[in-house]
Structure formats: structure tokens, C-alpha cells
Image (cartoon, coloured by chain):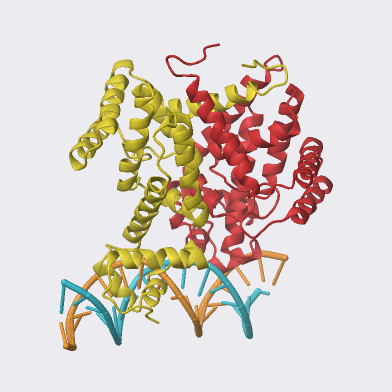
Chain colours: A yellow, B red, C cyan, D orange
Amino acid sequence: MQKTRRPLTRARVLQAAIKVADREGLSALSMRRLGKEVGVEAMSLYHYFPGKDGLLDGLAEALTEEIKAAVAARPPDHSIDWKTDLRSRCLAARQVVLRHPWTPALFATRKFVPGAMYLYVEQIVALLVGAGFSYQIAHRALHALGSLMFGFAQELFSPPASGGDLDAAKAAAEFACIAEDLPHLCAMIASEVHHVSETKIGWCDTQTEFEFTLDLLLDGLERLLPGGSER
Amino acid sequence: MQKTRRPLTRARVLQAAIKVADREGLSALSMRRLGKEVGVEAMSLYHYFPGKDGLLDGLAEALTEEIKAAVAARPPDHSIDWKTDLRSRCLAARQVVLRHPWTPALFATRKFVPGAMYLYVEQIVALLVGAGFSYQIAHRALHALGSLMFGFAQELFSPPASGGDLDAAKAAAEFACIAEDLPHLCAMIASEVHHVSETKIGWCDTQTEFEFTLDLLLDGLERLLPGGSER
DNA sequence: ACCTGAACACCGTTCAAGT
DNA sequence: ACCTGAACACCGTTCAAGT
């Protein structure tokens, strides 16, 4: 069944996994099925991934890379404004998701955001603050667009369900900053952590972000009302 | 292990399934585990559900019912405007999702929208058209809010991936109309089917809805720019 | 280092059998 | 009608063994 006899690679396994998921659905993607796809016993895959869950994490990572590549592959146009730029980024990302319809289901099962997402998001934060947005609005914009693109609910910095507190957020922030060069993202996190500790919000962290997106939508709808505020 | 010895019921099994998913995660919810929870062998569950997939469909249905109930349980206030009404509906629905964090993952794996969702959505359409919105905007508002609430991407009327054409949409429309009393939803579908056949959009149906939501968010963000259009 | 085969515990599902 | 037990094909994962 081996289509190509070049040596097995983490990346090659992930590409095969994408192929299987595209053709037969995410639920058909088993270690044994994937092993067959790359011409190897299922147990051999454990040399490249710590387990099925690790493989799925890698798959989410690969998906994110593909999205990043698709966004970077757009015809460069430095004359466009932030809005059309961000718009075309989202549309390009969506094309990738449409190619792999199981993306939302995969992302929904992952506990953590793929590492490559930080690099992807860095560009968007840079774009937003470059356009004049505050870090706080940039943060909320990220959530608003993230929920549309991938349906997450998932927090970027701090374990979502397992009671991620401020310390965890700080730790994640430091990690992100030393791991790669993410200047804008890093500055945004620092600003937000500071802001949060100041105002001491009692409620869930994501509640604020949720309401922000909700109000963005509701206000936008209101403007479309026949007697609404035209401008 | 049977906690209560009243006769087994579809509803009781579903409640037990919710409990298991809440405590141990959706991935821990197996037929055998669920059987143990209700004090029965796994095979007995096949008398109430056509299979695991059918059980998960039932689970999505039960979740939708819980959301509908939570929305209906809000303190009634007929003096409030459409916007605060819709807002509180969304917040109430979100509370249910927060109680069951596995909801997005479950919905992402379902092929069809739960039947109870139609009744839930009927109320929102009624609210929107009552406020003066056109059926078209109401339809798009549904998608915008739906993507925020549940992350779907999922089409309400027509199989999403399996090439759902206009006939399927019409069939679904008729089904929905005779099945329950959904006057507003029915009128909206009729209006949209007509509109679609008129303009003969060549691209994917959901693309329009996606871009609508995207622009709603981007326009809303633009308004938050320091030098933005205040009003 | 990379891969295998046998083994274990678990899974969804069938079917004939019980009451 | 409702539930069971044995059985089948499949799953993730271990471990000792091969090269």
C-alpha cells in the first residue's frame, strides 16, 4: 500500500492523516488505518507521536500551518487598508477550512491552541495595533474573529476549563515571548494581564470577550434596520 | 450501580449521558460506560437508540431542549426592546453551554441540526421580523449568532457537505412547515428559497452568510477605532 | 534508530437467547 | 417488550523482540 518509499517522517504521516480525514472523515482516522496509509504497522507511529491525542495535536498544528501558508500566499498589496487586508486574510483562512471540513470538529476536541496559531495571530495583532487599535480591542477582535473562523471559545492564554488563573496566563505569556519573536502578541498579553489585575473582574474571563462579540453583532444588526442609523 | 430503579427511559438515558459527559468528558461516553451508569448492559441501550450516532443525535437534541428551557425561564419582561431581549436570550443559552463545555465538540460532529433547534430559532425569527428586519437579514442574523453560540458553519436547511441543492432546501422547508407550527421560520425559508432562485448565486450558499458575519464584525471594529465614526 | 507481533483492555454492534 | 451473554471486528496502547 506504500505509495512512496521514501523514509517515514512526522510531516509525511501528518499529510497522510489529512488525506484520510478528507476522504473518510475524522472518525475514520485511527492509528491502524493511518499506519496502513503510510505502509507501516500502527505501532510504528508511536515513534513520531506520543499517542493518538498527540497525533491529533499535530494534525491541528498542520492545519494551522496550512492556513498560515494560504494567508501568506495571497498576492501582496501594501496599499490596502487594514480592513480589506484582515478581510482577505479571513477569507483565505476559510478556504483552507472548507478544504478540510473536519477542522472545527478537530479544534473543538483540542485542549490547547496549536503553537503555530501564535505566529499567525501575531501578524493580526500587528495589523490591528498598526491600524491604531488598542491592545484591549485587538484582544477582543481576536476572540470575535476566532469564534467565527474556528468556533473557539478556547482561550489563547490559560487552560480554558481547568481553572486557568492569572499565574497560568503570566506563565503562558512568558513562554510565548521567549519561544518565538512575537513582539505584538507579547505586548498585548502584558497589557491585558496588567489590565485584568487592575480591574479585578470577578466573572469568567471569557464572558467579557463573549459579550463584546455579541454586542458587535447586535449593534451591527441594529444598523441594518430600515429605520436604523444610516451613515 | 443503579441509583434509581424506576423503569429505563430514553430521557433518563440521555440525562445520564449528560452527567457522564459533564464529569468525564465526551470521549469517555461509551455505550458500555453509559449502560453501567443506568444499571444496564450496553446492548439494552439499542432498544432506545439506533446506535451510538443516534444516541449522540439525541444528546444534541437534549442539549437544545435545555437551552430552550433556559431561555424560556428568563424573567418575562414585555417592555424590553428586541436588542436587549435577543441579548439576554444569547446569554442564557451560553450559560447552558458553559455548564456542558463539550457542547461545541458534540455539535461539530453532528450532521444535522437538532429538530428542537427549529422551534428555538422560530422564536428568534419572530423577534427579528417583529422588530422590522427583513427575512433575509433575519436569516443572516441567525447565521451570525449561530456561529458565535455553537460554532456552526452548519446549514439549517440543506445537507451542508453532501451537495444540498435547492430541491433539498425546498423539501426541508415543507417538512419544517408541516411538522410543527413554525410560521416565521417557514416564511423566512420560503422567502430565501425564492430569493436564491432569482439571483442564481453561483458560489457556495454559506459563503454569503460567512461574509455577512465577517463584515458585521469588521465594521463594528472599525467603529471602535480612535478616529472612527462615532455615533 | 526504526519497525514488528503478540497481547491486553476496551470499543460499537450482531444475534440468538432468555424473561 | 425489554434485557442479557457470547461473539465479532475493531480500537489505543504496552512491551519484548527483532533488524
Quadrant position of residue B110: bottom right
> How far across and down, in percent of the image, does residue B206 sit?
62, 46
Residue A54 visible: yes
Q: Nearer the viewer, residue A9 or B128?
A: A9
Q: Quadrant of the C terminus of chain B?
A: top right
> How far across and down, in percent of the image, does residue A144 sit?
47, 32
Q: Nearer the viewer, residue B181 or B133?
A: B133
Q: Nearer the viewer, residue B74 or A147?
A: A147
Q: How many numbered marks appear?
A: 0
Residue most toward the right? B178
- The residue that appears at 49% across and 60% down in the rendered structure is B36
- The residue that appears at 75% across and 51% down in the rendered structure is B169
> How far across and down, in percent of the image, does residue B45 sit?
59, 63
Asked whether, in this view, residue A76 is left or right of residue B83, the answer is left
Is residue B147 shown above or below B17?
A: above
Asked whether, in this view, residue A11 is left or right of residue B138, the answer is left
Is residue D9 shown above or below B103?
A: below
Quadrant position of residue A57: bottom left
Residue A151 visible: no
Quadrant position of residue B71: top right
Asked whether, in this view, residue B70 is left or right of residue A135, the answer is right
Residue most toward the top? B231
- The residue that appears at 43% across and 45% down in the rendered structure is A75
> How far across and down, in percent of the image, does residue B97 sit?
52, 38
